[in-house]
Structure formats: structure tokens, C-alpha cells
Amino acid sequence: MNPFVFPLSDPQADLATVGGKGMSLARLTRAGLPVPDGFHVTTEAYRRFVADNDLEPGIVTALEQVNVAQPATLEVAAKTIGRLFGSGTMPSEIEGAIRAAYDELESRHRPAAGSSSSPVAVRSSATAEDLPGASFAGQQDTYLNICGVEAVLQAVQRCWASLWTGRAIAYRLRQGMVPDSVALAIVVQLLVPADAAGILFTADPLTGKRDEAVINAAWGLGEAIVGGLVTPDTVTVDKNTGRVIRRETSGKQVMTVRTAAGTEEQPVPDALKNKAVLSDEQAAELTRYGSRIEDLYGIPMDIEWTLEGRQFAIVQARPITALMDEGG
């Protein structure tokens, strides 16, 4: 097997090899959940890139100048390390493996007429994220609506560099992590042209109730919710019966949409601003997926989902890192 690229469902896709996000998606895929097709670029590829370009000395030197109490020093180090990654050359074995995996993905999913390639999401997956008790998720970059293998290769290299953002550097220094203890894997997945997206909590994150699921939902891709640009609908569902207990339908002003150049925020059409994103039946269906995922992991979960037409897709699932005790 190629050490640099794994199929999405590969049983060898563990934390050390594909990071927290990748490990979770592999597990969900093997369990038969509706996860978009794709592949992993492993941590071994990251380490090989760093080694072949002799980046470690430059990374260490840049970090020696950092004072966590002085944010400006973090940004200087991040920019310095970012330039190192940007000027690096991807080893031919890694480039060849990514090209082959992308070609296979393309062959399984022929793009729509008039399109030269299927758009993908290129998502960072760190070895210290999406774990119980961790708050590391989301500190590295994700690139959406990437079309063509050349653009994928560039996005992979930018994701590797994002392991060294100022925020990520500060977090690791506070946690006492040494530079060579972390590595970055990447998940390349088909981008779902979502009509709506959001987050599902399989326990109420505010009350701690384990018999209720809470769904946040907004129009378009999920980045508007993640980035705090929109107030989503909130739907609370009884997990045992699938009955909607409460609804809060917001006035949704902004949505993230695909464009020829990637993604952008656009105004929500007037007809949709005050319309509920999910019907009761859809909320119940999504909650059933959430219960399956919670049973798989054995703990309450924070799940990212998309909806295209009538089809849900699961694009991430992680343990809820902070959950009140019920009644506490």
C-alpha cells in the first residue's frame, strides 16, 4: 500500500496516520453512514515533505522567537513558516500518489456536463484534534470547491502550512507540545453542493439532556454557521420519538455558496430568509443518523451535516468536548 494516500474507509486510517478528522470519517464510512467519497493524504506525506525540503531547522528557529503573551511574535513566526512551506517542492512520490487517488475519485464520480472536474473539499486533519477533551479542531485550514488536480496539490501544501498558524502555535505551546510531536494529514472529499447545512448535537449542549438532540441549520454550505456569520435555525428533537419539541426559526441573512473561484458569502434570497430550513420529517431523519453515530462512539457527538435535495451527508463527527451534567 502507498504510505502517502489511503482510501477514505481504510481500516489503517488511525489517529497517527490520518489525524482526528480523517480517523472519524473513516470510521463513519465503514459503518455505512452517508459520507462523501474521498481519500486521505497521510501524516507520512507531511513528514516526508518537511524532511525532503529540510524545513525543521527553519521551523524551530522561527518558534524560538515566539512569546505567547505577545501575539505579534506568533504572527511573525506563522508567516515565516508559511513562506517555508510555500517555497517547498512536493516530492514526486507524493504528488504521483495524490494524482492517482484524485483520478480514481474522478472516475467514480463523473462531473456534470460542461464541468472539467468534480469539485472537492480539501480539509486539514491534525493528530491532536477531534478527541475527547481536546479543543484543537478547526485550527487548521479547509479549502472548498477546489477543481482539478493542480489546484488540489496547491491546497494540500497550503493545508500543511496551516499547521503553523499563530493560533495553532499558541495552542500547542500552552499545551506543552513540542514541534515534532504533531503532524498534519488531509482529507480530500467530494464537495456536496449543499442546499443547506449545519450542526447536530446528540445531547443538548446547554442543558446536558441526553434524550434530546439539538440541530442548527442554515441555507447553503456550512461555513456561514461555523464562522458565526449567520444565526441558524435551532430545532430540538426528542431522540426516542423523533418528535420536534421546540423550534426557533431565525431570519437568515447570509449563506455560503460555491462560485467559480471557490466560495463566497451572499445574501439569502428573500423567500428563504424566514423559512424553516428543515421540516419535522427531515429533523427526525437527521436525528436518527445522529443516534447511529452516538451508538457507534458511545458518547454524545457534535456532527456536521449537509443536505442536497432530500439526501443528507455527514461531513464530520466529533465528541462534544464540554457538556453539562443533566440538571447541573
Image: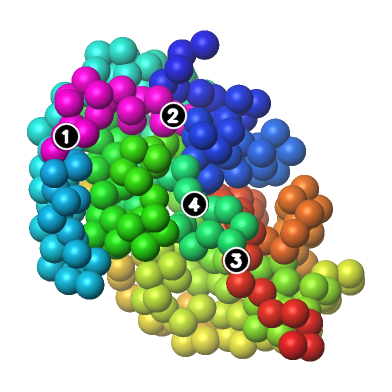
Q: Is residue 109 visible?
A: no
User: Pointer 3: residues within 10 angstroms few (<14), some, or many (20+)?
Assistant: some
First-in-chain label (4 vs 3) = 4
Name the residue nearer the viewer: 158 or 59. 59
Quarter where residue 212 is shown:
bottom right
Tell me which segment is drawn in magenta: 36-58
Q: Badge 1: few (under 14), some or many (20 or more) residues near its Cα, within 10 Å?
A: few
- CA distance for labels 4 and 2: 15 Å
- Spatial CA distance of label 1 from label 4 is 25 Å
- The residue labelled by disc 2 is 42
Distance from the alpha carbon under mark 2 to that under mark 3: 25 Å
From the viewer's side, name the closer residue of 171 and 324.
171
Q: Provide the residue designation for mark 1.
A: 57
Looking at numbered disc 2 in the image, what kind of residue is underneath it? Thr
Q: Is residue 146 magenta?
A: no
What is the three-letter code of the residue carrying label 4? Glu
Relative height, residue 9 to residue 214 (above, below): above
Q: Which residue is mark 4?
A: 129
Tag 3: residue type?
A: Thr
Point out the tag, 2 or 3, that comes first from the N-terminus: 2
- What x and y, as percent, mark residue 165? 25, 55
Residue 245, numbered label:
none
Residue shown at the point (61%, 87%) measured from the top left: 248
